Amino acid sequence: MSGMKTCVVLMSVLAVGWALTEKELQDSNYLKCNLESKVSEGEPILPNTEWIDIKDECVNLARKQIRMEFEAALAYLQLGSYFSQYDINRPGFAKFFLGAASEERSHAIKIFDYLLMRGQLTAYHSDPQLHTLIMGTSVNKSSELTKLSVALKKKEVNGGLEALNLALGFEVAVTRSIKKMIKACENDEVLSEKEKVLLSDNDGSIASNDYHMVDWLITDLLDEQLKGQRELAGRIATLYKMKDGYGQIADFLYDKKLLEELNSKAA
Amino acid sequence: MRTTLIFISFFVPSHPFPVRRGAPPVYSVVPTVGFSLFAVQEVVRKKIVRRFARRNFEVNVIILTFKMLFKVSVLLVAAVTLVNAVDSKDETCKPYFDQYCDKKPPYTDSSLRSCSPLYGAVDKRANQLRKYIKEHIGNSFEYLLQWANFNNYKKDREGFAKLYRKLSDDTWEDGIKLVQYLGKRGVELDFDSLIYQTPPQKYGAGPVGKSRSENEIVSLAKVLDLHKQLAISGNSLHEDSIKHDSLRHDGSSNLEVEHQHDIELAHFIEEEFAGKHAQTVRDLAGHSNDLKRLLKEGGRDDKKLDASGFYVHLFDEYLRKLY
Ligand SMILES: [Fe+2]
């Protein structure tokens, strides 16, 4: 009988010991990865969100704008590649459009930067449409990008002049979209619920006109946009006048001039 | 002696008679075959004349005729295959101009085709190269999202953000470099396939909308995987471009040279990507292991004193100075 008792005691001691080591092992293998989910008691001390006063409509349009800039980047990448082909052979135009592609990407980054400064983009991957545009797994035949790619494949884009005109068309669309964003950001009539609360909580001291964003849109984005349009329009006019009566040689010479210009700008 | 010479002439493929792209092989075969038939006839005639002087020549003539017939057929097959052993891509440019220069049209503008820079096997790697461009642009975009993710006020990890931004810029530049490379080697970009193509699955980015706000170690691991995929794709491009050229039967009994070897493509991948990718992948792996050790030590006593926030901040400072 006592043998039996000793046996039970021994067994339970072993079981407790085993459980303890297991616990210790689990503890020592514990890898805390997510710093934002605190297990410790008490509320996590995070900055309050009162400082985030950007209008919802503004944010939505800015995100759409990011999408548009990336779309333009991919369109220019296509045009750059088109002029790089041996049968087209326009290195000046190729360099111009590949440069423009990187520039459009930098515009998108600029908008990212602004939204981050205003306390936005705290959730990763919040724009599946943007993701689809770049990583695109589904064919969207109606998209502007696809239409352009089909036209280029069939060699329906006839030389530099037409490509420059296409580019000016993209830029005009982008400019309109920026203006729409400016309107939405200064509009103090359409308010979201959160904005209404903010407005009443602060006795109207927070104006819903987002002066800063409007200013940034005008002095940074819109400024670059208008200058870019002027540049394109100038190139189109020059090339058009050259081409009048001299088709091939005008394209050839203008392309070499463009290459020289871009190379000297880079140096 | 003469037979030897004639025999040798069969083994000089294509060069005695210029072959141009699109021309049916018969143009080049006709003179070869005609010439060889003539030569063989001559040899048979001489041998038969010599044998006439001997006895039981009838038997000999029959045997000889069979032998010669056999030889002729072998030679004919050899001639046809060797003359046709030209890749249709190895086109020549000059014949076009020989054909059209200083001649009054009926030629149309479209019959004056462009001379191409194509040679080697770069056109066989076209789809791989397009996919590679797509991978670069897709990865560059993923890294940019990671940059934004660590640049928001809640994360505020300047070091991580700098690392991802640098990777994103670099990968984008490489994508453009690849677009220019296609242009250089005469391969069309095929824009549709650039925009709409399924990204790689094993190491590629996950399905849209599935991933939530990512923490430091998970993002490092993810970017490491993504970048490894670029290195792997570069490897397979290189591997395929150093294969040996091979002979291939087409529908009939003709042999064709199938170009697999492309020294310039192999060199381009080595020079521009191989070393750089290895270094980046190594750096990312190193960072993730450092961070893992820190997280393990910092987060061990998770109830009382959680040091992981402090440790990760120090690690971020290190990255900020590094990049
Ligand atoms: Fe832009």
Image: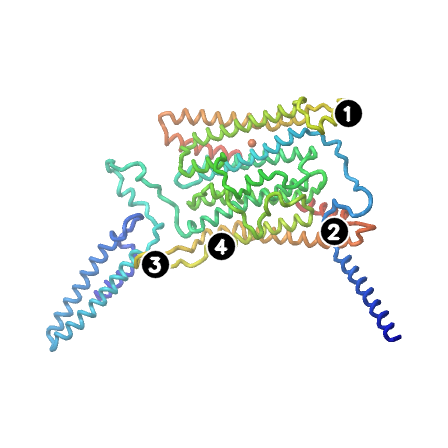
| Chain containing the residue with disc 4 | B
- On residue A202, which mark appears? 1
Disc 1 crowd rating (10 Å Cα; few below 14, some 14-19, many 20+) is: few
* Secondary structure at numbered mark 2: loop
* Secondary structure at numbered mark 4: helix
Circle 2 is placed at which residue position?
A: A32
Q: Are marks 3 and 1 in contact (CB under 8 Å)?
A: no
Disc 4 crowd rating (10 Å Cα; few below 14, some 14-19, many 20+) is: many
**Circle 4 or circle 3, nearest the eye:** 3
User: How far apart are the two marked residues, 4 and 3, measured between alpha carbons?
Assistant: 26 Å
**Circle 1 or circle 4, nearest the eye:** 1
| Chain containing the residue with disc 1 | A
User: How far apart are the two marked residues, 2 and 1, measured between alpha carbons?
Assistant: 40 Å
Do badges 4 and 2 share one subunit?
A: no
Circle 3 is placed at which residue position?
A: B249
Q: Amino acid at mark 3?
A: His
User: How far apart are the two marked residues, 2 and 3, measured between alpha carbons?
Assistant: 61 Å
